[in-house]
Image (cartoon, grey):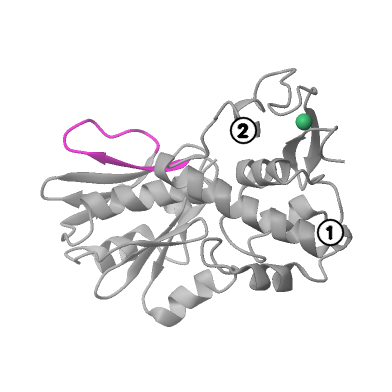
């Protein structure tokens, strides 16, 4: 599932192939994926526009032009693919046609969405529901935004209103690296634990960015979590699974308790 590092990878793909170029046409827009716009208005609004540099806010990719901005959320299975000749895929939900190829938003399971922000106010109505991007949030701001939450720490990290960009893998990885039980209430964490957690989150994100995904390193929880009966890369204890906020959560019962 695309998390901040994956979307950062899609941002690089967009920047490499579409930024500072004029889109000739917009095709194959899936009606079920457009949010507050239609395939027709989207295609009309973007055709012959020149894209500027894209940027990311949490898991949203924002692709401005001189006028409206295209906003993409990748849901569970989304990606961006550049093609200069291969046949289209049946899961392509939006195709930006350029003189030298096509940029395709592919999304099998269709979670996520496609927005058109016609002006800064419309963009604010999309991004304004999110907390600050994880790469921009300071330790003090993190503490302040966590404050008063009654949920478990794992659920709070996944809540995009606290800070935007973490997903299931990054949250589990950072909690494991910080040796904090994902089931603990936010209010039970002391200042030192919050500081450690903040540092580990930043580290996991920054280590993942060059890969464009959360890498399954052997020394990381992510490298072991998908093996049935997988053990903790640090202490060898068999990893445990539970569900928090509807998502499979993996942790080391010995070091995270
Ligand atoms: Zn362990």
Q: Which of 92 and 252 is in front in this view?
A: 252
Q: Which of 92 and 241 is in front in this view?
A: 241
- Secondary structure of the residue carrying tag 1 is loop
Residue occupying image coordinates x 58% and y 26%: 218
Query: Could you tell whether 50 is left or right of 116 in the image?
Result: left
Indicate the quadrant where residue 68 lies: bottom left
In the image, residue 121 sits, relative to residue 54, either above or below, namely below
Does 79 appear in magenta? yes
| Residue that numbered label 2 is attached to | 220
In the image, residue 169 sits, relative to residue 233, either above or below, namely below
From this viewpoint, is residue 29 visible?
A: no
Q: Where is residue 146 in the image (x, y as percent from the top left)?
A: 75, 67
Q: Position of residue 164 (x, y in %)?
A: 58, 61
The quarter of the rendered structure image containing the N terminus is top right
Q: Which of 141 and 48 is in front in this view?
A: 141
Neighbours of disc 2 within 10 Å: few (<14), some (14-19), many (20+): some
Query: Could you tell whether 38 is left or right of 65 in the image?
Result: right
| Residue that numbered label 1 is attached to | 189
Of the four image quadrants, the one with ligand 1 is top right
Residue occupying image coordinates x 75% and y 50%: 154
Q: Where is residue 130 in the image (x, y as percent from the top left)?
A: 59, 68
Q: Residue 123 carries which label?
A: none
From this viewpoint, is residue 237 visible?
A: yes
Dot 2 or dot 1, earlier in sequence: 1
The quarter of the rendered structure image containing the C terminus is top right
In magenta, the rendered stretch is: 78-91
Most distant residue in the top direction: 229
- Secondary structure of the residue carrying tag 2 is loop
Neighbours of disc 1 within 10 Å: few (<14), some (14-19), many (20+): some
Residue occupying image coordinates x 79% and y 71%: 147
């Amino acid at each position: 599932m695309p998390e901040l590092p994956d979307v950062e990878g899609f941002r690089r793909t967009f920047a490499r192939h579409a930024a500072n170029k004029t889109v000739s046409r917009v095709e194959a827009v899936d009606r079920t994926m457009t949010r507050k716009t239609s395939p027709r208005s989207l295609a009309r609004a973007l055709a012959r526009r020149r894209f500027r540099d894209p940027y990311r806010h949490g898991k949203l990719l924002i692709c401005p032009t001189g006028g409206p901005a295209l906003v993409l959320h990748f849901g569970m299975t989304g990606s961006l693919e550049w093609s200069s000749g291969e046949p289209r895929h049946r899961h392509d939900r939006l195709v930006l046609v350029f003189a030298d190829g096509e940029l395709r938003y592919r999304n099998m399971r269709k979670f996520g969405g496609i927005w058109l922000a016609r002006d800064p106010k419309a963009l604010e109505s999309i991004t304004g529901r999110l907390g600050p991007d994880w790469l921009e949030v300071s330790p003090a701001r993190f503490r302040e935004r966590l404050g008063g939450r009654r949920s478990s720490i794992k659920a709070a990290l996944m809540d995009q209103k606290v800070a935007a960009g973490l997903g299931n893998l990054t949250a589990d990885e950072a909690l494991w690296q910080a040796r904090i039980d994902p089931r603990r209430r936010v209010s039970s964490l002391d200042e030192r634990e919050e500081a450690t957690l903040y540092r580990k989150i930043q580290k996991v994100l920054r280590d993942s960015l060059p890969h464009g995904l959360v890498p399954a390193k052997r020394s990381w929880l992510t490298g072991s979590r998908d093996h049935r009966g997988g053990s903790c890369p640090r202490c060898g204890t068999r990893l445990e699974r539970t569900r928090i906020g509807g998502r499979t959560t993996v942790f080391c019962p010995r070091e995270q308790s």
